[in-house]
Each structure stands twice: as structure tokens, then as C-alpha cells.
Amino acid sequence: MLPTFVIGLREGLEAALIVGIIAAFLRQSNRRDALRAVWLGVGAAVLVCLAVGVGLELLSANLPQRQQEMLECVVAAIAVLMISYMVLWMRRHSKDLRRDLQDAAGSALARGSAAALVVMAFLAVIREGFETSVFLLAAFQSAVSPVQAAVGVLLGIGLAVALGYLIYRGGVRLNLSRFFRITGVVLVLVAAGLVMSTLRAAYEAGWLTAGQQTALDLSAVARPGSVTESILTGMLGIRSTLPVVEVVAYVLYAVPMLLVVLWPVRRVPGRRPLGWALTGTAVAALAVAGVLVAAAPSAPGAVTTAQGPFALTGDPAATGGTTATGSATVTIAAGGTAAQLAAEIGVGGVGSTIEGDSTLTATGGATVSAADGTGHSATRYTGTPITRTVDAAAAGQAGLPATLTAQQIAAANGGRLPVGLRAGGTAATSGWPTTWTETLVPQLSLDAATGTVLDVQLQLTRTAAVTLDNGTVVAVGTAGSAAGSDGAATGEITVAATADTVAAALPRVADADARRDSAELYGRVLPALLLVFALTLLLFGLPKVLRPGRAARPRGLPTTAGPADSDTRVPATTPAPAEHPPA
């Protein structure tokens, strides 16, 4: 509520001052016709601003979620720039605002042009209204309660209109310089909150993924529903949990801007000393950024060596009461696109070895947990099947029969024979020659950043095909329990990495994450923020160094030069008017 109140009050008062001074001149000049035109221009400007605000809100509401976040990011960034410029401009011109407007109005009337004053009032209201629309849209998007935000802006604009009217009637003496300094402090804090909102929206839009490590956790202080939480979140835009990039950006924006607003006017340095101070600070920031980049640890690379062996175990209930065990070694291609697999799976003491390449496809996310409760978010990949034909010797070792009778095949297929087979005949009784095929389907959980394998699950399926007397090969499916004495050995076998294997992989990933976070924070995030900070200071500092002014100013700290405090009742005796603050 407070941010929208201050925005409505400050922007509304700027427009009210301009319109009030123009209206007072016209009334004193007995130009009632022009005064009516001024009010019509003000009304038209208000309607246009309302239409702009409604249009922005409708545009935001009708966009998909990701596009809404993008628009919110852009609007918040524009609002920060506009608030910053407004604060700096008012710091410099608040003393002379009334006097300059009086001079401009007097010059227009001297030329006999009241239309210029009508246009001036219209543009003043529409400019402040456009700024207010952008500010309020950004404030509403980050507000906890839109109702309170709406009440705040209505109260602010209402008070601004009342003050403007009292100034117009000559009944209020307002110290503009002090007023704009106090509201400037509040707006700087609001803008700093919008800086964090900009970065948060950029993260949610997918534009910014770096620097999201938690820097501050204020949940113990700002409990949900508490007064502290309302002040921090509702008024200043500070959330209970703040990532590093938002905290650093907040400090780099808020501290210099508060110095600009609060530094005593009479202690402002001269143009050249101020330029050197800004430039020197920028150079120091660039030096710190360079040191951080040089000292930052290197990010861990992708794992390219073979990983494992992973101990595997199967559920006895799924393997005919016999525990399936095994091991697997995995080599992951860069980017998690393919895997080389070497696995041995045994049931009842009989093993089967299978190797091959499998193309991986991401099928979703997963959380891999160890027995002690520690876990890590991973990406689940499913590989294409690896198939091999089992030779006679390997089939014998695995307990796979060399022949299958019609009775065995029918039992494995629900009492029916596949098409192409007949129950009669010698071969049906003695058995047809049988070939076995093993198909292995891997499912892997990987740390996507490094390609570290956290979990392995393998499904081995053994299928049979018989060769008839005429040479025709007929697939008879998974043999199941009718295929041999140990049905589990000839059906589908699923094994997965043991809890100990998963627990051993998690520390390696945690260490890689810590190294990657440090490399990102000190090698990219902090240097990038310092670079933006330095370039901004150079933008203001270099022109003052290269083109110094003629007159030196009193000594002090960096800030935009501004006049001494003054109230609104200043005689209109100054020479040429200063320019108006652009939109």
C-alpha cells in the first residue's frame, strides 16, 4: 500500500503543481475561456492515461504464463529506470520548478498564446499519467494484496489533487525540495524492490538462471501473515527468501541512490571532482570484478569415464521368489545423449552378460534418495533396447532349454499355440529347436549438469523363437514358467541399483554442485553485476571529467547537484525556465 500511495502522491502532485500554476496565471489574467480549455485538456489526458493503464493490464492478463513473466520483467525494468530518472531530476530542479513554470506561463501570455498553456497542462498530466501507469503496473505485479495497492494509489492521487488545489488557491505553503527528498527515499527503496522483482521475473521467464543460490532467509523474521512480512514484502518488495543475484543487485542500486537523495546539497562536490569520484569508483568495481573472475574456481566438466560398477538387485516377488542380482558399468556420452552399457544379471546363481549402446531420451524428472534420507534432483532417461541372440553355450549356462514342446509353448501363452504351430507330430512332442533373444532396456537417472549416473534400473526380457521342419521361424513370446525349471530365469527380470550404490554417488554430485555454484557466483554473477554498476557510473562520471564545468561546486560526496531547500512561494524573477522532466 505504501509504495502505490507514494507513487500516486508524488506523480499526482507533480501534475497538480503544473496545472495549478497554469490555472492560477490564467485566472489572474482573466482568461476564463482558456481556463476552461485547460480543464478539458486535463480531463482528456486523464482518460488517455486510464486507457493506457487498462490496456497494459489486459495485455498482461491475456498472455501465457511465460510471456506474462517476460512482460513483467520488462515493465519492472522500465519502471526502475523511470523512477531513477525522476528522483535524479527532482533532486536537481525541485527548487526552481514553480519559478520556471511561472516564467514559461508568463512568456506564453506575453505572446498572446493561451493555447501553449493548454498544451502544457495536457502534456504534463499525460506524461505523469503514463509514468504512473508503468509504475503502478510494476507495483501491482509485485504486490501481496492488489486491493491494498489500489487503495494506496487512490489515497495518494486524492491527496495530491487536494494539495494541488490548495496551492492553486494560495492556501498551502509546501517545501518542495524537502517533500521530494523524503518521497525520494521511499521511491528509492521501492525501486530497489522492483530491481529484485525484475530479476525474479527474468528467472521465471527463463532469461536468468545464474545466481539463484540462497543468500538470505528471512522466514524466521518475516513469518507469513506477520506485520514484518507485510512491511518487507508488501511495501518494499523484499521476499522471505532471497537469492544472491537479487541481494547484490539491491545493494548496488539502493546504496548509491540513497546517497544521491540524502547527501546535503551544500556539500555537493564540483563537476570535475564528482566525475573523478564516479570514474574512480567504476574502475575499482571493474578491478574487483577482474579479481573475482581470475580467482573463481573452474566449473566441473562432464564425466566421460566409465561409471560403476553399480550393484544391482531385484525384487524376489517379481522373480519367482528368487533374488536377482547383478552389476552394471555405464559410460555416458556428452549431454546425456547415449550410453554404453555392460551388465551382468543373474537369477538363482545363473548369470547373463549383455553389452551394447543405447540412445537416451529424457522422460522426466526424478529425485534420487539414499537410505539416510539425502537426495538429489535428477533427470530420468530411458534408453533404446539393447538386443542380442544367446548362443547355445550361454543359453545352457542360463538354464534356457534348447528345445520347446507344444505343451510348454501353450502353457506359456495361456493355453494356446501361436499361429503356425500344431500340437500333433513328433516335433511337437519332442520339441522344436529354440533360439533365445535377450533384450535389455535401461532407465538411468543422471545429474544433467555433469552426466553423473545416480541410479540404474535394467529390465531384461528373454524371448524364444522355434524353427519348424520347413525352416520357418515362429516367435513364441516370453517363455515364462513353462520354459524351464526356473521360470524367473526365462521371463522378465528387473533389477535396480542398491541404496548403497546411490548413497556413494550423491556426495560426488554434491561436490560438483558446490564447485559449479562457486564458479557461477564468483566467475559470472558478481562480475556481471559489478560490470553493470561500473558502466553506469562511467556514464555519469566520464562526461564530467572530459567536459568539466566552469564554476567549481562545494566539496562533498557523489550526487547529482541540486539547489537548496525552497518552498513553493518563490517570486517569478529568474531568467530563462529550465526544461521539464521528460517522460
Image (cartoon, rainbow, N blue to C red):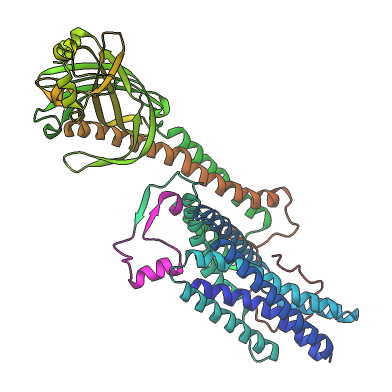
Residue 330, x across and y down, in percent? 30, 22
Instruction: Please give the name of the residue rendered at 30% of the width and 14% of the height, measured from the top-left corner.
Output: 473
Left or right, 396 with reference to 198:
left
Where on the picture, by quarter, is residue 175? bottom right
Left or right, 129 with reference to 225:
right
Residue 34, x across and y down, in percent? 83, 85
The relative height of residue 110 versus residue 141 in the rendered view (above or below) is below
In the current view of this chain or complex, which residue is farthest to the front?
424
Q: In the image shown, does 254 or 496 lie closer to the viewer?
A: 496
Segment colored magenta: 218-247
Residue 462, x across and y down, in percent? 23, 22
Q: In the image shown, does 554 or 322 lie closer to the viewer?
A: 322
**Residue 278 showing in the rendered view:** yes
Q: Is residue 318 magenta?
A: no
In the current view of this chain or complex, which residue is farthest to the right?
111
Where on the picture, by quarter, is residue 187? bottom right
The relative height of residue 332 versus residue 390 in the rendered view (above or below) is below
Residue 143, x across and y down, in percent? 46, 67
Where on the picture, by quarter, is residue 455? top left
Q: In the image shown, does 557 or 293 lie closer to the viewer?
A: 293
Instruction: Please give the name of the residue rendered at 29% of the width and 17% of the height, measured from the top-left corner.
Output: 474
